[in-house]
Amino acid sequence: MPEGFSAGGPPAAGAPASLVARVVELAERLGVSRDEILDPERLSGESGVPAGAVRDLLDGGTGGEGDLQTRFLQRFELLRRTRLKANGRPYTQQEIADGAGMSRQQAGALIHGDRRPTMEHCAAIQRFFEVHAGFLTAEDPEALADCLRRTEQDLLLRLAESDGEVPVPATELPVDPLQRILQDHGVRGIAWRAAQLPSDKHRDKVTEWLDLLLENVRRNDP
């Protein structure tokens, strides 16, 4: 197992303006204010990006910490502080170790920054805390953009529930090619249902099932 990994490439600047605009428009259609939907504290909790960096990104800046190790420690600490047990207490080091399939010593070394995380460590911790892939490692601009996309997805679903149907994006907004394919081929409902699953682990299972089904169909009906 490798003793750590690094993320390459310079970070993009700011949050995508078109994405922010879409999120704000959807929120307003649901009666939610811009300040509420773009609240830095809320976005920080969901993305792992520090609130100050969220503000900077929304203003067109480059965000915060670029070092992977520091970023991992910041977000791991946020998970331990905000993702609590049913009784409101934080998970112990032993509980994290057991849930992530590692030794207590390994968990302690990661928590205190004495050991650089591997991709396997990050994936295991993310599964334990039931957060999306990349929560611990994505650079700030990417993490915030992913969070805004999930917010957009959630708002679309809420709008669909209020209207009784899945809303079609406004004509003045760019149409995603994949979304058009899904709509044209009658499988959009599958995508929307998968979007409501609580974690990447669940969505990976759906993908696995679909792959198996597709392989079976191809084998029986070439």
Image: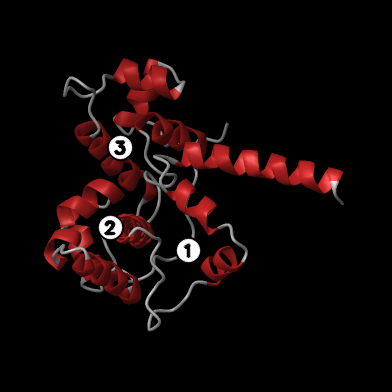
Mark 1 element type: loop
Q: Closer to the N terminus: mark 2 or mark 1?
A: 1
Q: Closer to the N terminus: mark 2 or mark 3?
A: 3
Task: Name the kind of residue labelled 3 in the image.
Answer: Phe
Residue 159 in which image quadrant? bottom left
User: In screen coordinates, is 155 left or right of 186?
Assistant: left
Foreground: disc 2 or disc 1? 2
Residue 195 seen in the current view: yes
- Between the residue at mark 2 and the residue at mark 3, the CA separation in whole angstroms equals 36 Å
User: In screen coordinates, is 166 left or right of 155?
Assistant: right
Task: Name the kind of residue labelled 1 in the image.
Answer: Gly
Name the residue nearer the viewer: 7 or 33. 33
Residue at numbered disc 1: 9
Q: Which mark is residue 162?
A: 2
Foreground: disc 3 or disc 1? 3
Residue 168, x across and y down, in percent:
41, 70
